Amino acid sequence: MELKAEILLPGGPANGRCLALTAPISFWGGVDPATGTIIDARHPQHGRNVAGTILALPGTIGSSSASAVLLELVHAGRAPAALLLDAPDAILLLGLVVAREMGWQAPPAFRLPAAKQADLDGLKLAISVAGMIAAG
């Protein structure tokens, strides 16, 4: 299986097991910035950890503080290896841009429709700098 994702924030290549969320999430109050654990008790993937994963997000629940949480995850070394977003999210991307400005290695971000994300859950993925996604 090979897919092409649109580059939102370049970087990579990235490798990791895909964690495809089944519901939108708010990073603010939904993800522990120190550990990467999903702490929103109502979220279907509560208790899962985003650190080192290829995190597929079917949507986000807005809070301007989400960028700060993602920034803290990068700083703590607990960020996802890459983000796959259904639609660009300026708040999350801002966290990654600021992390890079701070000189920290931030993950790349790509756009991949949610309809294609679900099939990737649990698969080991490799994403090229050009946005080519290979499972294997």
Image (cartoon, rainbow, N blue to C red):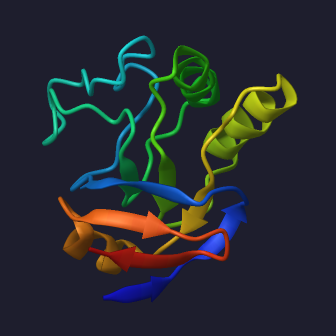
The answer to which quarter of the image holds residue 9 is bottom right
Q: Residue at x 50, y 53 (%)?
A: 83
Q: Residue 65 in the image: x percent, y percent?
A: 60, 23
- Taking 112 as reference, is 44 above or below it? above
- Residue 68 shown left or right of residue 119 in the figure: right
- Residue 65 shown left or right of residue 78 in the figure: right
Q: Residue furthest right?
A: 101
Q: Residue at x 26, y 74 (%)?
A: 136
Q: Residue at x 37, y 57 (%)?
A: 56
- Residue 16 shown left or right of residue 4 in the figure: left
Q: Residue 86 in the image: x percent, y percent?
A: 47, 67
Q: Quadrant of the N terminus?
A: bottom left
- Taking 83 as reference, is 117 above or below it? below
Q: Residue 69 in the image: x percent, y percent?
A: 54, 22
Which residue is at the front of the view, 56 or 80?
A: 80
Q: Residue furthest top?
A: 34
The answer to which quarter of the image holds residue 74 is top right
- Taking 27 as reference, is 32 above or below it? above
Which residue is at the front of the view, 26 or 56?
A: 56
Q: Residue at x 53, y 15 (%)?
A: 76
- Residue 122 shown left or right of residue 117 in the figure: left
Q: Residue 14 in the image: x percent, y percent?
A: 52, 56
Which residue is at the front of the view, 50 or 135?
A: 135
- Taking 45 as reference, is 13 above or below it? below
